[in-house]
Amino acid sequence: MNAPNTEASSSRFVTITEAGQPLRLHYNDVGSGSEVVVMLHGSGPGASGWANFHRNIEPLVDAGYRVILLDCPGWSKSDTIVSTGSRSDLNARCLKGVLDALDIAKVHIIGNSMGGHSAVGFALAHPEMVGKLILMGGGTGGPSALVPMPAEGIKLIGALYRDPTVENLKRMMNVFVYDTSSLTEELYQQRLSNILARRDHLENFVKSAQINPKQFSDYGARLPEIKARTLIIWGRDDRFVPLDIGLRLLWGIPNSEFHVFSQCGHWAQWEHAEVFNNMVQDFLAR
Ligand SMILES: O=C(O)/C=C/C(=O)/C=C/C=C(\O)C(=O)O
């Protein structure tokens, strides 16, 4: 019997060059299929590939995919960074560096929130390297037609970055998911320890937003350039990146489809993991 895949057993590092400087990035590498699925996490404090997607890795690995979870610069065990330009483009450059280092020519990408913005940035810069895209609660920065921006959840993320207390974490997590009864003390403690482990990441995120408040590019005008078949997934009750941003993606990306979960906040892959996993496998196999 194979040993279970764990964060520790799949943990790897690679050093790329970013803006002429070495940048050490952490990733998890699970499974050994010839088709590769990259998972890109969101921008909340304490996020990581493993923390965002731990309910989604095993089903894809069991279905025969190799899964790479990249921790973007400024999160988890990756180097810290001050982002003064587009963070979505920065993450896209980092993904290119990692794939080149691993000699991987083509990937499917699942992006959550900031990870969705970064996946679109990557697809625009390197269309030949993208198989299919799955965008959840993200895909472009820019305005919502319905909700004042920054949305309430994004304001709570900012407060948590500036003042990383368990009270601020609970305030953020309580609008993060639809069903707050799913939030356990263990989850809070795990997330808080991730957050407090890297105060440099917190400080640099705050600094980045002060230098450039628009960290996430508005790719709206360029969405029609995306040729990859794209599955857009959203929570109806998303209070971080409003649902109508998903509609903008659907209008803009020519070969796209849109699924909305009711009773779901910003973490569709976690709140509706089983249906999400089946949907992803079906979409990738089509
Ligand atoms: O401001 C945006 O457009 C993006 C926000 C996020 O990326 C928020 C993500 C939060 C998480 O996924 C998390 O795990 O904290």
Image (cartoon, helix red, strand yellow):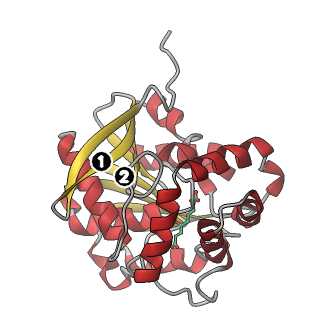
Q: Classify mark 1 as within 8 Å of ligand 1 or not, answering yes or no.
A: no
Image position of 117 with respect to 131: above or below: below
Ligand 1 visible in quadrant: bottom right
Q: Quadrant of residue 259?
A: bottom right
Residue linked to disc 2: 79
Q: Position of residue 125 (x, y in %)?
A: 22, 67
Q: Label 1 is placed on what type of residue? A: Arg
Task: Please provide percent x and percent y for residue 91.
Answer: 34, 61
Circles 2 and 1: CB distance less than 8 Å?
yes
User: Which of the two residues, 238 or 22, is positioned nearer the viewer here?
Assistant: 22
Q: As drawn, is 165 to the left or to the right of 92? A: right
Amino acid on which the number 2 mark rests in the picture? Asp
Identify whether 2 is placed above or below 112. Answer: above
Left or right of 89: which side holds 218? right
In the displayed structure, 265 sits above or below 285; it is below
The total of numbered circles placed on residues is: 2
Question: Residue 266 is drawn in which quadrant?
Answer: bottom right
Q: Is residue 283 left or right of residue 86?
A: right
